[in-house]
Image (cartoon, rainbow, N blue to C red):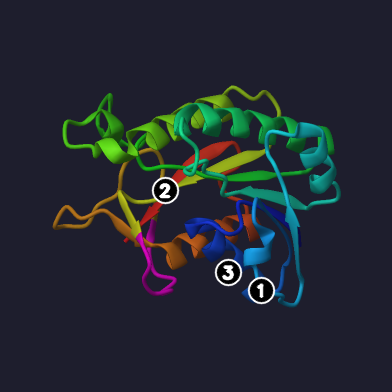
C-alpha cells in the first residue's frame, strides 16, 4: 500500500515506520524534522505542520491509508495542541479523500471497571494526564464522525521498547492485563497489531487495544 505516516520520527511512529517498510509498503513519512530519518527503500520523508490544513491535505493526496502517530508531546499545552492537530488531521483526511485513517490512541480511555476508565483512577500518573485526556477526547471526535473510516489502537497501560514477538491479545474498550495484573506491550508488537489492522481491517469505526 501507499501509506502516509504522520509523526514518523516519534517513539511509536518509528516502530510503525519500521514495521510498514519491512512488510513491503511504500511510506510517505511526515514529521517536523524529517532529516532525522535515514534514506531507505520505499521511503519518502517530508516536513509537515499539522496546523497547516491545506498543506497537510496536499501531502495526503493519493494515500491508500493515513496512519497518525501525532502526539504533540513537545508542546507546552499538550492537550489543546494535540486536539487541534487531530481535528486538522481528520479534516485533511476527509478533504484528501483518503480511504482510511488509523490513529495511535492512549490507554487512559480504556475501562478498568464498569463506568471507570484508567485515566480516572487515583494512581494515574500526573505526568501523562494531559496527553491521556487529549487522546480520550480525540476518540470522542472520531466517534462523532458520520462517515470517516477510522480506527484507533490503544496500547496496554505500559508500552516500552522490547521484542517483536507477534504474540499478543486484542481487546475492545477494556484494559487488558495478565494473570498478575500487568498490562504491557512492546512498541514493536504494538506496531505489528496496527499494521495487521491496516492490511486486514477488522475494526472499522472502532477503537481496540493490544496487550500480552
Q: Secondary structure at mark 2?
A: strand
Distance Cα–Cα, label 1 vs label 2: 30 Å
Magenta stretch?
160-169
Residue 123 lies in quadrant? top left
Q: In what quadrant of the picture does the N terminus appear?
A: bottom right
Residue at 13%, 57% in the rendered image: 180
Residue, far left: 180
Judged by depth in the image, the label closer to the viewer, 3 or 1, is 1
- Marks 1, 2: nearer the viewer: 1
Sequence-earlier tag: 3 or 1: 3
Q: Earlier in the sequence, mark 1 or mark 2?
A: 1
Q: Which residue is mark 2?
A: 209
Q: N-terminal of the two: label 2 or label 3?
A: 3
Name the residue beneath numbered marker 3.
19
Q: Secondary structure at mark 1?
A: loop
Q: Is residue 87 above or below residue 97?
A: above
Front label number (2 vs 3):
3
Image point 52% across, 41% down: which residue?
72
Residue 64 at x, y = what percent?
78, 53
Q: Residue at x 76, y 44 (%)?
A: 99
| Quadrant including the C terminus | bottom left
Image position, residue 176 (x, y; %): 30, 49
- Residue labelled with disc 1: 38
Amino acid at each position: 500500500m501507499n501509506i502516509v505516516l504522520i509523526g514518523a520520527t516519534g517513539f511509536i511512529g518509528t516502530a510503525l515506520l519500521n514495521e510498514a517498510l519491512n512488510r513491503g509498503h511504500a511510506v510517505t513519512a511526515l514529521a517536523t524534522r524529517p532529516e532525522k530519518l535515514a534514506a531507505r527503500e520505499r521511503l519518502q520523508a517530508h516536513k509537515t505542520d499539522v496546523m497547516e490544513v491545506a498543506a497537510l491535505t496536499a501531502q495526503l493526496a493519493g494515500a491508500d491509508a493515513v496512519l497518525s502517530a501525532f502526539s504533540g508531546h513537545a508542546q507546552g499545552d499538550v492537550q489543546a495542541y494535540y486536539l487541534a492537530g487531530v481535528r486538522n488531521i481528520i479534516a485533511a483526511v476527509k478533504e484528501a479523500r483518503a480511504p482510511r485513517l488509523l490513529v495511535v490512541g492512549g490507554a487512559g480511555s480504556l475501562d478498568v471497571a464498569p463506568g471507570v476508565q484508567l485515566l480516572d483512577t487515583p494512581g494515574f500518573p500526573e505526568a501523562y494526564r494531559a496527553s491521556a485526556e487529549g487522546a480520550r477526547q480525540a476518540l470522542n471526535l472520531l466517534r462523532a464522525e458520520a462517515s470517516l473510516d477510522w480506527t484507533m489502537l490503544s496500547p496496554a497501560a505500559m508500552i516500552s521498547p522490547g521484542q517483536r514477538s507477534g504474540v499478543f491479545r486484542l481487546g475492545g474498550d477494556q484494559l487488558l492485563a495478565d494473570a498478575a495484573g500487568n498490562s504491557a506491550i512492546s512498541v514493536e508488537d504494538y506496531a505489528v497489531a496496527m499494521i495487521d489492522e491496516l492490511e486486514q481491517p477488522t475494526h472499522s469505526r472502532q477503537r481496540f487495544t493490544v496487550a500480552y
